[in-house]
Amino acid sequence: MENVLDLIIVGAGPAGIAAAIYASRAKLSFVILEKAFTGGQIVNTYEIENYPGIKATSGFELSNMFREHAETLDVEFLSEEVSEIITDGPIKKVITNDGTYEARTIILATGASWKKLGAKGEDKFSGMGVSYCATCDGAFYRDKVTAVVGGGDVAVEDAIYLSRLCKKVYLIHRRDELRAVKVLQEHLFKIENIEIIWDSEVAEIIGDQMVEKIHVKNRLTDEEQMIEVSGVFIAVGSDPNSGLVLDQVETDLKGWIKTNEDCATSVPGVFAAGDLRVKSLRQVITAASDGAISVYAAERYLVTNS
């Protein structure tokens, strides 16, 4: 039992890093595993203006600050891809490409992934004009015409960001009003090189080797149009990265993990923090809060089950 840890944190976005900071301060024995890079989806956010104490920064810069903070507490980030998680019994197991970790508690902080549009040509032109990250790929479309698909915060943020680089940006939304917060909408409506196409969907993405145009259809009138664009940025929401535990913890119909206010799942000793759990607001600040809460709950679990 001497190799059994107190805690395994799976995922190193804001929730996972916050959990690591709190776990380190609590003197728990733990590991934090991340298959790709720290920061999660926020590294793709061009501008963050709603994190208390930081007036304005980029998601990439904020994620670096998170990591640097954790590293001052001697947190070691392990770059390993998790292939299996076993949650039954008092000892939980996480199997990665490099080995197996055992712990009495697990915090799942694997976040969510961009949702696909499902349009014809989307997969064909992925990486060749179709992108899910404007801040990653926007620079490739400087002085060109692009389209953003969606109506939430991310879609509006993407359109605003691209408007600074591109000659023109179309924002295509399937409804007649946006879902983004009002301050973002007000900003968007003032930008002259953004044109909003309401009540419409992208039926097909067309091109030869690269994206050349999109086939757009109005949902109410069935009117169709072809719009020449060099790039299509898709921002229509996200899906939870809960696949490894779908048959083990309770979820809703879409796979978002159900928890109580302490981030505890239906399995004792297993907690979910951040974007992958059922919640009303998915933001950096709520993810970080979940990370702190889940560690506090894990500590109490360890004390009562020692």
Image (tube, rainbow, N blue to C red):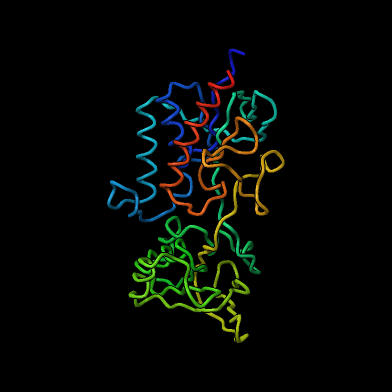
Q: Residue furthest top?
A: 2
Q: Residue furthest right?
A: 247
Q: Is residue 242 above or below residue 184?
A: above
Image position, residue 253 (x, y; %): 68, 53
Q: Residue at x 62, y 35 (%)?
A: 82
Tell whether 83 sits left or right of 279.
Answer: right
Q: Is residue 161 above or below residue 89?
A: below
Q: Is residue 117 above or below residue 15?
A: below
Image position, residue 274 (x, y; %): 50, 44
Q: The C terminus is located in which quarter?
A: top right
Q: Residue at x 48, y 31 (%)?
A: 295
Task: Tell which of 166 and 151 is nearer to you.
Answer: 151
Q: Residue at x 55, y 63 (%)?
A: 236
Q: Residue at x 39, y 31 (%)?
A: 70
Q: Report the label total.
A: 0
Q: Is residue 116 above or below residue 87?
A: below
Q: The N terminus is located in which quarter?
A: top right
Place residue 45 in its image quadrant: bottom left
Task: Tell which of 192 and 212 is nearer to you.
Answer: 192
Tell whether 126 sits left or right of 20.
Answer: right
Task: Tell which of 265 and 36 is nearer to you.
Answer: 265
Image position, residue 89 (x, y; %): 69, 26
Image position, residue 130 (x, y; %): 54, 63
